[in-house]
Image (cartoon, rainbow, N blue to C red):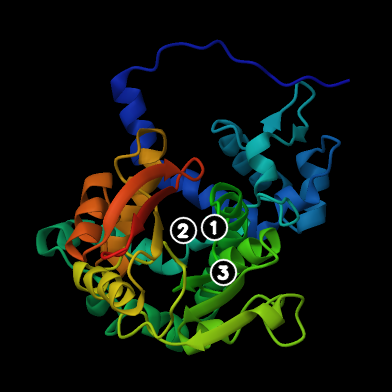
């Protein structure tokens, strides 16, 4: 039987903590390397030596041991007393088959463009704008789809994984009793919509997103899928128009690019909806204390890549109110998402 090594907990002096923080790229790089090598996938329930893992992932044993030892400092893997390595709750999140896998999120947040962009954060802070045009001569999504196909694939996998995981939480939270129709606006591949339709078999749904996005909609929603008979798929840009009338509108994680996009999207919902329709906005918040390290980091990445921003609770309520929505409850969806309940005026 092997046991994990333990260390005596001591108070870390501020100077050492600061040194650890400014070496954060080493941790991010090690997580990326572990994900790309497939170390967590190669490690099963039985602890393994660095040599065994190196043979499985085709790596140098000594270098792999060094990387694993660094990751154990952050609780990603653990080293046992006999020198083998075992899983932790966090290292299992790097497995592709884990239902809560963060493998592709880890890769997305450490893609090659991120290492070019982060050193220019001071420039983005001075200007308040994205640095992408200066770096690559084009906008973020144009760059992904035209010049960085591998990154585009990682982005799509990461967004799909994240959407599938949060869809379960959204469906569990929202009570659509009494509604006949629901519309997922800017809903990506429609994982949230599919989860809601499965929960409420009497409801019909509409998915609206850009043509290239809905072309790859959840198989459950497409022709021949289990939910296809109850779904209308509408290619379109919610910033331009929302040709959808529904009892309930879901707007999740799309009001974060810039104020103009947010204003136009919310305005289009109010124009399209009948009086008293329910509008649920779901977003990450930068003033949500338990997840602030995560959400404020996402906020800075949005500044770098698209010039966008995450919201505070106050700013989200303000923008919804400016659009004419009557905001009610704000409820947590999970550890990093909040749902803003509202209705359109006149109901």
**Image quadrant occupied by the N terminus:** top right
Q: Decide: few, some or many residues near mark 3? Use Cα within 10 Å; few <14, some 14-19, many ≥20.
A: some
**Front position among marks 3 and 1:** 3
**Of 346 and 312, which appears nearest the observer?**
346
Name the residue located 22 percent from the left edge and 46 percent from the top edge: 314
Q: Which residue is mark 1?
A: 105
Q: Residue furthest front?
A: 347
The answer to whether any part of residue 60 appears in the image is: no
Residue 336 in the image: above or below residue 210: above
Q: Give me the residue at 61% from left, 37% from top.
A: 76
Mark 2 vs 1: CB contact within 8 A:
yes
* Numbered tag placed on residue 109 in the rendering: 2
- Secondary element at image label 2: loop
Residue 329 lies in quadrant: top left
Q: Could you tell whether 22 is left or right of 322 in the image?
A: right
Quarter that holds the C terminus: bottom left
Image quadrant assignment for residue 272 = bottom left
- Inter-mark Cα distance, 3 to 1: 35 Å
Point out residue 71 in the picture as x, y percentages from the top left corner: 58, 38
Work out whether residue 66 or residue 290 is closer to the camera in this orientation and state it: 290
| Circles 2, 3 touching at the beta carbon (< 8 Å) | no
Compared across the picture, whether 291 is left or right of 173 comes to left
Q: Nearer the viewer, mark 2 or mark 3?
A: 3
Query: Is residue 12 shown to the viewer in this render?
Result: yes
Q: Position of residue 323 (x, y in %)?
A: 21, 66
Secondary structure beneath label 1 = helix
């Amino acid at each position: 039987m092997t046991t994990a090594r333990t260390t005596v907990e001591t108070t870390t002096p501020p100077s050492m903590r600061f040194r650890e923080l400014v070496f954060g790229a080493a941790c991010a790089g090690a997580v990326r390397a572990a994900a790309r090598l497939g170390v967590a996938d190669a490690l099963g329930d039985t602890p393994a030596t660095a040599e065994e893992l190196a043979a499985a992932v085709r790596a140098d044993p000594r270098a792999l041991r060094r990387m694993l030892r660094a990751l154990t400092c952050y609780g990603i893997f653990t080293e046992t007393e006999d020198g083998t390595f075992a899983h932790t709750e966090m290292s299992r999140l790097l497995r592709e088959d884990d239902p809560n896998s963060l493998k592709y999120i880890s890769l997305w947040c450490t893609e090659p463009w991120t290492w070019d962009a982060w050193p220019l954060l001071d420039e983005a802070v001075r200007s308040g704008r994205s640095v992408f045009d200066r770096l690559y001569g084009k906008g973020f999504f144009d760059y992904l789809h035209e010049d960085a196909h591998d990154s585009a694939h990682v982005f799509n996998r990461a967004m799909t994984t994240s959407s599938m995981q949060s869809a379960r939480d959204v469906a569990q939270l929202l009570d659509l009793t009494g509604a006949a129709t629901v519309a997922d606006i800017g809903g990506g591949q429609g994982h949230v919509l599919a989860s809601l339709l499965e929960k409420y078999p009497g409801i019909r749904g509409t998915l609206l997103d850009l043509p290239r996005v809905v072309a790859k909609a959840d198989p459950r929603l497409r022709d021949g899928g289990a939910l296809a008979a109850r779904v209308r798929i509408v290619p379109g840009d919610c910033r331009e128009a929302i040709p959808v009338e529904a009892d309930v509108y879901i707007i999740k994680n799309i009001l974060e690019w810039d104020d103009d996009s947010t204003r136009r999207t919310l305005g289009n919902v109010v124009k399209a909806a009948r009086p008293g329709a329910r509008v649920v906005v779901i977003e990450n918040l930068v003033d949500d204390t338990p997840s602030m390290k995560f959400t404020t980091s996402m906020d800075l990445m949005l500044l770098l890549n698209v010039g966008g921003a995450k919201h505070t609770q106050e700013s989200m309520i303000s923008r919804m109110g400016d659009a004419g929505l009557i905001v009610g409850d704000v409820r947590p969806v999970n550890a990093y998402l909040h749902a803003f309940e509202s209705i359109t005026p006149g109901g």
